[in-house]
Amino acid sequence: MPAMKSQGSPPAKDNQNARSGFSDDLNQLLEHYLILLDQYQSLQTKLSKLLSSGYISLAEANFKSAGKIRYGQDFYDERMQATKNVTAPSENHYLIPSFELAEPSLKTPNSDSMTNTPPESASPPSKAKRLPSDPLHWFGILVPPALRTAQREFTGAVVDIVPQLVEVIAEMDLYERRIKEARNDGKHGES
């Protein structure tokens, strides 16, 4: 009988080692996911602080403005365009996506995309029709310091925090899928 027990124990050890290896892999995936979750929460907190500070500065600029000038999205027309965009490079299909900041092409209302004329025959827009590079110039030369602070806070949120946040979210999604696959593999391995 002792010989039979020794023959039956190696498969049990192999099964136990396989479960231990599966458990270790799953633990590593979960540990990395929790690190990502912590980064996500930290970035959300930073983003919230920057946006709150930006809106408070914008409210201060509106309160202290001379001549009843108001600042905000309701007080400029549709010609105002974003000066920062987040883009995802397409060459990175199977890895964790990376995101970068891109300068959008500013178009005037009379640009080629608004007319039916071909690009070769279109005349270049005059300097008077070009949009200024700094959106603060839409509100004059002497804008309140609080408005400059609001711009700095909002730009910091878009330039620094949002790309990091988008990358962390994409990586979390990837790890969620890996954890789900590992759990499914573990269930099939136990059967």
Image: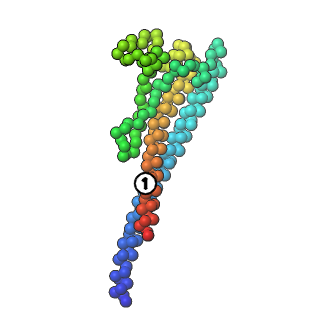
Residue at 42%, 34% in the rendered image: 87
Say left or right for 51 vs 104: right
| Whether residue 174 is situated above or below residue 158 in the rendered picture | below
Indicate the amino acid at tag 1: Arg
Snapshot quadrant of residue 148: top right
Viewer-proximal residue, 126 or 24? 126
Q: Is residue 29 above or below residue 60?
A: below
Number of numbered discs: 1
Q: Is 69 displayed left or right of 158 in the figure? A: right
Name the residue at 57% across, 19% down: 76
The quadrant of the rendering that contains the N terminus is bottom left
Q: Which residue is mark 1?
A: 178
* Residue placed most toward the observer, 87 or 45: 87
Q: Quadrant of residue 50?
A: top right
Q: Is residue 104 visible?
A: yes
Query: What residue is drawn where x is 39% and y is 71%?
Result: 15
Q: Position of residue 189 (x, y in %)?
A: 41, 67
Packing grade of label 1 (10 A; few <14, some 14-19, many >=20) is some
What secondary structure is marked by label 1? helix
Image coordinates for residue 157, horizontal then vertical, percent: 51, 33
The answer to which of 66 and 12 lies nearer the viewer is: 12
